[in-house]
Structures are given as structure tokens and as C-alpha cells.
Image: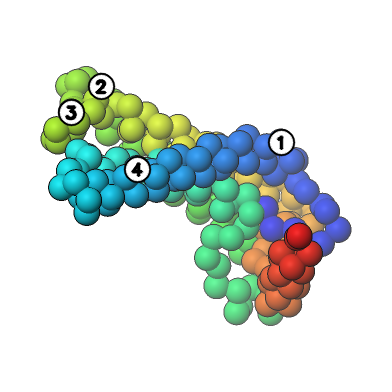
């Protein structure tokens, strides 16, 4: 979750962060491999008049799976879009209640996505569905990875919502961890990232 300084990581972020980071790295390698596949397809078409079958289909699976895992990464980083105009002008307790409501709502959405995703996967397994393409990929494979990503997102979202309820005793910390970053904090983070990039050899 968002932390406005001091390294005050909440327990959910502390323990789930490593899992999400590992999943994000795997997704990054997947995207890199898909980019390589697309380059080969482009070269094959331009130079030899040949094409790799199913590149666009694999691209669809890539988008779905990496997006599902990306939801969890974005949630832990506190980067889901929030309208901060009102929240940051409210007193501490009303702001904490709105931040709690946001955590509960996103948990509800995540659980709904997981339920719908599982329903699609279960149907594909039941009917042994395959893709309507020359690849004939069993749909349970990409859909299973997609559901795993949605499950990670839902699990973290529910854990964060429960944690937010328990944090109501400390509204200031709840706001610090669950509230949207201020413009000043985003500018400071951007400057730090720029300085880190410039410092590299």
C-alpha cells in the first residue's frame, strides 16, 4: 500500500510483496518473450513471406494474464486511480472512513472478478474447450493462469480490507497507508527515480 514516508510497511504488503514481485518478474519475462516472438513474426513476413500462426492469439492471453497479476502489483503500490481532491481536504476520521470504504469496494470487485473468472475456467474444463484457431490451445491453460492472477489480486485485496478495518483504531496510520499520494509525494518520488537513473553508469 501507499506509504508517505518512514518505511512504515503494513504486514500485508510486507509478506505479500515478495510473492507479487516474483510474479511481476515472471510476467516481465513473458512480455519480453512475446516481444521477441512478434519481432520474429514481423521479420518472417517482411523477408520470407512467412508468418507465425497465433501470434495475435498469444498476445491476447499475454494481456489477460499479465494484467491480472498487474492488478495485485498496482494495489500493493497504491497506484489504482483515486480521486484525491476531496479526501485530502477532510478531517482525519472522515478521510479514514472513505479510505476504508475504498479498500472494501476494491476487495468486493476483486472477489467478483475471481468468481467470474473461475466460472469461465470451470466451463472450459468441463467442455474441454480449445481455442478457435490453428493452435487449438486448451483454454484451461491461459484461463488457469488468468484465474491464478485474479486469485492473487482478490486475496491481497481482501487481506488489505480486513487490515484496514483493524486499523480504524489508528486513523492517521490508515490514511497514511491507504490514502492516495499527494502531488508533493508524487513529485518527490519522480525526482528520486530520475536521480537514481542519472546515477547509473
Give the residue furthest to the front. Answer: 47
Disc 2 and disc 3 in contact, CB within 8 angstroms: no
Q: Is residue 169 visible?
A: yes
Contact flag, marks 1 and 3 (Cβ < 8 Å) = no
Q: Is residue 24 above or below residue 187?
A: above
Q: Residue 123 or 34: which is nearer the viewer?
A: 34
Left or right of 187 on screen, residue 33? left
> In this picture, is 20 found above or below 91?
above
Earlier in the chain: of badge 4 and badge 3, it is 4
Secondary structure beneath label 3: loop
User: Which residue in the structure is indicated by mark 2?
Assistant: 125
Q: Nearer the viewer, mark 1 or mark 4?
A: 4
**Label located before the other in sequence (1 or 3):** 1
- Taking depth in this image into account, of 72 and 133 the one nearest to the observer is 133
Residue carrying label 1: 15
Q: Quadrant of residue 92?
A: bottom right
Amino acid at each position: 500500500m501507499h506509504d508517505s514516508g518512514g518505511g512504515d510497511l503494513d504486514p500485508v504488503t510486507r509478506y505479500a510483496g515478495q510473492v507479487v514481485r516474483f510474479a511481476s518478474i515472471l510476467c516481465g519475462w513473458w512480455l519480453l518473450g512475446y516481444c521477441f516472438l512478434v519481432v520474429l513474426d514481423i521479420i518472417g513476413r517482411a523477408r520470407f513471406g512467412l508468418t507465425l500462426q497465433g501470434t495475435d492469439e498469444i498476445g491476447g492471453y499475454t494481456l489477460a494474464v499479465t494484467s491480472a497479476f498487474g492488478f495485485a502489483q498496482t494495489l500493493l503500490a497504491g497506484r489504482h486511480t483515486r480521486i484525491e481532491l476531496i479526501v485530502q481536504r477532510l478531517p482525519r476520521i472522515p478521510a479514514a472512513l472513505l479510505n476504508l470504504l475504498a479498500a472494501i469496494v476494491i476487495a468486493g470487485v476483486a472477489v467478483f472478478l475471481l468468481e467470474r473468472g473461475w466460472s469461465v475456467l470451470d466451463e472450459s474444463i468441463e467442455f474441454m474447450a480449445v481455442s478457435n484457431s490453428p493452435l487449438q490451445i486448451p483454454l484451461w491453460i491461459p484461463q488457469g493462469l488468468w484465474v491464478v492472477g485474479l486469485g492473487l489480486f482478490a486475496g491481497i485485496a481482501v487481506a488489505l480490507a480486513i487490515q484496514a478495518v483493524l486499523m480504524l483504531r489508528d486513523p492517521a496510520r490508515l490514511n497514511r497507508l491507504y490514502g492516495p499520494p499527494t502531488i508533493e509525494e508524487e513529485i518527490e518520488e519522480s525526482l528520486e527515480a530520475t536521480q537514481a537513473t542519472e546515477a547509473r553508469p
